[in-house]
Image (cartoon, rainbow, N blue to C red):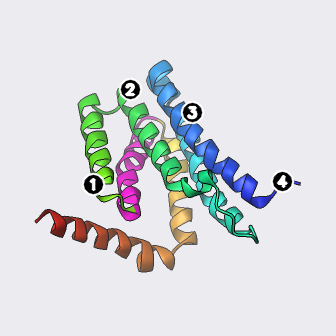
């Protein structure tokens, strides 16, 4: 029987691959792959929801390399989404490059998890907006998932995650001053 930690690591690894797949879709299929790209993003979000609880079921609390790089898998999906949108012509390649450079520099300089969470918002928001405009059913699917996720994590989202992100942004601004 497959252990929960192994399954969690597999789901995290799948997210790394989905980030690369989104990049490939942009290069090879362009805008015609929007439905596939939206579904792959949804699959990535589902794997992200499942891998944490599965990893916590490991009674020995083992750490693995892939489990310790869960956030990097999330970033791979976010930047794969962003590059898909640029390569498919939905956003300016200059904008994509500038945001990618800004994000990489900010992570290199400050290396904070809340910052990494925040950097994912623009690519995901742009994908949702693009899907709503060009393939409304897929856009509604993504919006519905985000709504369900916020509802499922509601007490934690406004009480912990949002304040952590805002405090990190405030601290980063103070460091620059």
Q: Earlier in the sequence, mark 3 or mark 1?
A: 3
Q: Earlier in the sequence, mark 3 or mark 2?
A: 3
Q: CA distance from mark 1 to mark 2?
A: 27 Å
Q: Which residues are magenta?
A: 113-134
**Quarter occupied by the C terminus:** bottom left
Q: Identify the residue position indicated by label 4 in the image.
A: 2
Q: CA distance from mark 3 to mark 4?
A: 29 Å
Q: Is residue 155 visible?
A: yes
Q: Identify the residue position indicated by label 2 in the image.
A: 87
Q: Nearer the viewer, mark 3 or mark 1?
A: 1
- At 30% from the left and 36% from the top, the residue drawn is 96
Mark on residue 109? 1
151 to 2, vertically: above or below: below
- At 64% from the left and 56% from the top, the residue drawn is 64
Mark on residue 36? 3
Q: At which x and y percent is residue 172? A: 23, 65
């Amino acid at each position: 029987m497959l252990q929960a930690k192994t399954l969690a690591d597999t789901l995290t690894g799948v997210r790394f691959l989905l980030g690369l797949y989104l990049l490939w879709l942009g290069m090879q299929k362009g805008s015609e792959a929007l439905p596939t790209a939206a579904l792959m993003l949804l699959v990535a979000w589902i794997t992200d929801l499942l891998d944490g609880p599965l990893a916590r079921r490991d009674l020995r609390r083992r750490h693995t390399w892939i489990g310790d790089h869960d956030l990097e898998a999330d970033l791979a999906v976010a930047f794969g989404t962003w590059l898909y949108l640029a390569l498919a012509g939905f956003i300016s390649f200059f904008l994509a490059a500038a945001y990618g450079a800004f994000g990489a520099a900010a992570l290199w300089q400050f290396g904070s998890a809340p910052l990494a969470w925040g950097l994912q918002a623009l690519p995901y928001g742009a994908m949702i907006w693009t899907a709503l405009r060009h393939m409304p059913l897929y856009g509604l699917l993504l919006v519905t998932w985000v709504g369900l996720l916020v509802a499922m994590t509601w007490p934690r989202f406004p009480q912990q995650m949002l304040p952590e992100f805002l405090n990190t942004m405030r601290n980063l601004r103070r460091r620059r001053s």
